[in-house]
Image (cartoon, rainbow, N blue to C red):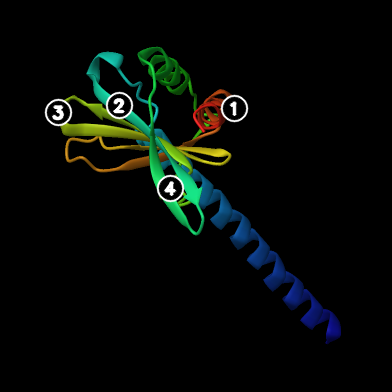
Amino acid sequence: MNFKKAGLISGIVANVIVAVILLNQKQQQSKDEIQAESPVYETINSSDIVDYNMSKWVAEGATAMQEDISLSQQQVNQLIQWLNSSSGTTVTAIDRVDPQISAGIAIELKNDREIRIQYAKTEVYVTRNDLFKEGKLTYYKVDDPKIAGFFDTIIKVKS
């Protein structure tokens, strides 16, 4: 009788393990399909840029204030080049951006569209509304030390 119960329990446990594995594979497959369908990898065309501005958050006592930072066209072009060279291994689609942003660049595009590149200490986030006709927002994270280093350098130099 004990062998029968042990066999039954072993069977149930094995089925649960298989179900969890299959569910995890399905979730990963769905995430991969969403990333493949999402046009987050579309390049940014420099000729579409109308204007850009950068700002950072500066703590002053118990409050934080936003401070503008001037960038050269060369710095913006370099940043765009790094973003455009990002690949599927360095870009991850996300649902939202970390709210603890320390600096950001807003790039105004033609046709009332915008790209925001935001920095939260070690993470670089991109928000775009230029990829869909209805202006739907697309969020992704870029894991590129050159872009993170760009923000670190600009923030320190302009402090």
- What's the residue at 53%, 25% (across, down)? 150
Mark 2 vs 1, N-terminal side: 2
- Give me the C-alpha separation between circle 4 and circle 1: 18 Å
Q: Amino acid at mark 4?
A: Val
Q: Mark 3 = which residue?
A: 111
Q: CA distance from mark 2 to mark 1?
A: 22 Å
Question: Which amino acid type is marked by label 3?
Answer: Asn
| Left-right relation of 46 to 5 | left
Tag of residue 52:
2
Label placed on residue 145? 1
Q: What's the distance in space between the residues labelled 3 and 1, CA to CA? A: 31 Å
What residue lies at 33% left-to-right and 21% top-to-bottom?
Answer: 44
- Mark positioned earlier in the residue sequence (3 or 2): 2
Q: Tell me, for residue 50, which label it has, or none.
A: none
Separation of marks 4 and 3 at Cα, in angstroms: 24 Å
Rendered location of residue 82, percent (x, y): 47, 19
Q: Are marks 2 and 4 in contact (CB under 8 Å)?
A: no
Q: Classify mark 2: residues with Cα within 10 Å, few (<14), some (14-19) or many (20+).
A: some
Name the one closer to the observer, 141 or 8.
141
Amino acid type of the residue that numbered disc 2 sits on in the rendered structure: Tyr
Query: Which badge, 4 or 1, comes first in the chain's sequence?
Result: 4
Residue 121, quarter of the rendered image = top right
Residue at 76 percent of width and 71 percent of height: 10
117 or 66: which is nearer to us?
A: 66
Question: Mark 4 highlights which residue?
Answer: 97
